[in-house]
Amino acid sequence: MSVLVGKKAPKFQAPAVVNGGEIVENFSLEQYVGKKYVVFFFYPEDFTFVCPTEIIAFQDRIKDFDERNVAVVGCSTDSKNAHWTWLQTEKKAGGIKGVKYPLVADLSKTIAENYDVLAGEYFFNEDSLSEFSGDPRAYRGLFLIDKNGVVRHQVVNDMPLGRNVDEVLRMVDALQYFEENGEVCPANWHKGEKAMKETHESVASYLSEK
């Protein structure tokens, strides 16, 4: 598994469904560089079970992300038409109607491959033909990208393991606090709590208060 933290987020252009029903053919994260932070997350497949709980959970907290100047973008290896259909399907029927942030269609699997969250790989067989080995879906990867387009945090879960949106917001808060104040955020830090300078004295003072 590649570690992308500290590196530029891999670029791409791909179809996406935005605002719950509009198809954009050449969607790119480049539109946010210099303007917004990005939470870019992968999920395995449309019309499944854990995936809608995560996608809707992000939508339920979208105001919290907006307040932090963060764009939320989802991605799977499904087609743009599958995304669109799922977005038109009522929640009581297993759909995600009401989700407004972009869902990227990585049908070629190249985005998941470049972010190293694809649960399989392509190879050439004895006849020099391309084949795929493994599961042609993405693990639950999540990448926090700063306004310079650099990955500052990543986490990858196996497919059965849903993510915690509160933890994603905590990491956004920690990154923004560090950028604004130059202080580092200790274990279990939350917005409004004391942070530390990168000195032995600051660490000692912090620990003595615990």
Image: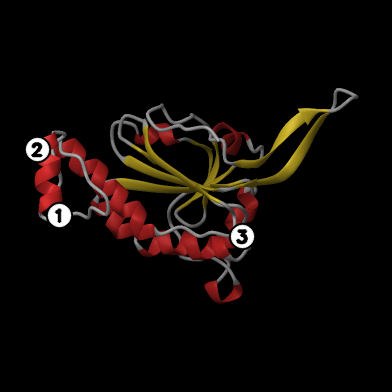
Closer to the chain start, of discs 2 and 1, is 1
Amino acid type, residue under disc 3 in the picture: Thr
Residue located at (62% from left, 41% from top): 118
Amino acid type, residue under disc 2 in the picture: Glu
Amino acid type, residue under disc 1 in the picture: Glu
* Residue 96 location (% of width, % of height): 52, 65
The answer to whether 165 appears left or right of 54 in the picture is left
Q: Real-space Cα distance between discs 3 and 1?
A: 43 Å
Residue located at (27% from left, 54% from top): 188
Q: Which element carries disc 3, helix, strand or loop?
A: helix
Q: Real-space Cα distance between discs 3 and 2?
A: 57 Å
Using the rendered view, name the quadrant where residue 90 is placed: bottom right
Q: Which one is nearer the viewer's eye here, 162 or 15?
A: 162
Q: Real-space Cα distance between discs 2 and 1?
A: 18 Å
Q: Find disc 2 in the rendering and name its residue.
A: 201
Closer to the chain start, of discs 3 and 1, is 3
Neighbour tally class for label 2: few under 14, some 14-19, many 20 plus, Cα within 10 Å: few
Indicate which label's residue lies in the foreground, 3 or 1.
1
Neighbour tally class for label 3: few under 14, some 14-19, many 20 plus, Cα within 10 Å: some
Q: Find disc 1 in the rendering and name its residue.
A: 193
* Residue 120 location (% of width, % of height): 69, 40
Q: Find disc 3 in the rendering and name its residue.
A: 85
Residue reaching furthest to the right? 127
Residue reaching furthest to the top? 128
Placement of 189 over or under 98, stated as above or below: above
Q: Are marks 3 and 1 in contact (CB under 8 Å)?
A: no
Tell me how many marks there are: 3
Rendered-image quadrant of the C terminus = bottom left
Q: Which element carries disc 2, helix, strand or loop?
A: helix
Indicate which label's residue lies in the foreground, 2 or 1.
2
